[in-house]
Image (spheres, grey):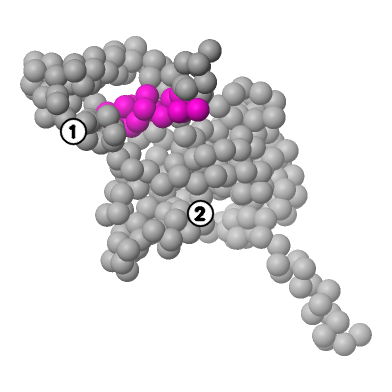
Amino acid sequence: MTNTVKAEQVTWQEKLEYVRFARAAELIGCTQDELLHLGSIGEATFLAPVVAEGDYEWPVSEIGEKSWDNPFIEKFDRSDRVILHRRDVAKIEAVGWVIPWLFFSPSVSRYVIKKFASSEDIREKMNASANAVPWYAVETGLEALRDDFMPRIKDTKENRTTLDHLFLSISEIRRLQENVPQDGDAKQRRETAAEIGKEHGNSIRFSGHREEVLMAAIACLFKTKEDIRIAGVAWAELVDEKGGLFWKKGNPPLSRSEIARLLNSAKKYPDSPQWEGRCEE
């Protein structure tokens, strides 16, 4: 048998990018429970398809900072392989399934950067966030106003990510086999849990803050003569500037970007065709 034939026999193996979770455990030489636990504590990077298909947004500004002023939006579906947050892997470990409302997708982030960045300098700044800033499910409905910033993807079996959906990349398997430390990007993703908890905490305190901000925003809408309804950013700026009129401390309890995101949620729902149809009824 020639060397050419031998090379052709292994080419398909060399082209593999990822394998299913069970096979990954075999290759690494550990049990599936052990590997799942490594994922739940952020010591192993897990991939999964986006089972809950739809629009997701990436809140990164042109200077590479996290910002909700004008997030990038892209569609994701089951053909995409994204990096799960360790908390979602922990939920799979606990109950067997999860519906992720955020995930990491460095490849799509870099695609967006390449498509929209206007200069090499901006591209370089944004690339620093490509691996560590998550994509979030776009909020829908009035629930985004009355509960918290966590989107409401329907809790159906079709939207659940389970153990059967999990993959590990070949490079991650080799890293674990060789006991090589994680790179800086993986460590950053592992440490985003505290930030996520602060932003998306489902608590009475945060709910009260949003109610206060919405009351102030309505007051500003009635008092101003400017057309601030076009953009949530301009409306948020006005609420922030007039903060002394509504709060003793002089500032709103939410940041300007958080206010803009809250007001944009109200502006987008319902859409015009739905609104016009409802009125005609």
- Residue 194: x percent and y percent? 37, 33
Work out which residue is located at the far front of the displayed protein and give it: 280
- Residue 259: x percent and y percent? 27, 28
Q: Is residue 163 visible?
A: yes
The kind of secondary structure the magenta stretch mainly shows is helix
Of the residues tagged 1 and 2, which is closer to the observer?
1
Instruction: Give the CA distance from mark 1 to mark 2.
Output: 30 Å
Q: For the residue carrying disc 2, how many other residues have a C-alpha within 10 Å: few (<14), some (14-19), or many (20+)?
A: some
In this rendering, would 127 be left or right of 278?
A: left
Which residue lies under the disc numbered 2?
Answer: 108
Q: Which mark is residue 75?
A: none
Which of the 4 image quarters holds residue 204? top left
Which residue lies under the disc numbered 1?
Answer: 237
Which of the 4 image quarters holds residue 257? top left
In this rendering, would 241 be left or right of 67?
A: left
- Residue 225: x percent and y percent? 14, 26
Q: Marks 1 and 2: CB-CB under 8 Å?
A: no
Work out which residue is located at the far bottom of the displayed protein and give it: 2
Q: Which residue is drawn at 13% across and 16% down?
A: 246
Nearest the viewer among 201 and 176 is: 201
Q: Residue at x 46, y 22 (%)?
A: 275
Q: Which residue is drawn at 36% across and 27% down?
A: 267
Q: How many marks?
A: 2
Amino acid type of disc 1? Glu
| Mark closest to the chain's N terminus, 1 or 2 | 2
Amino acid type of disc 2? Val
In this rendering, would 75 be left or right of 247?
A: right
Q: In this view, does 138 lie above or below 49?
A: above
User: In the structure shown, which secondary structural element does the residue marked by tag 2 occupy?
Assistant: helix
Q: Does the magenta stretch include residue 266?
A: yes
Q: Bounds of the magenta span?
A: 258-273
- Residue 75: x percent and y percent? 54, 45
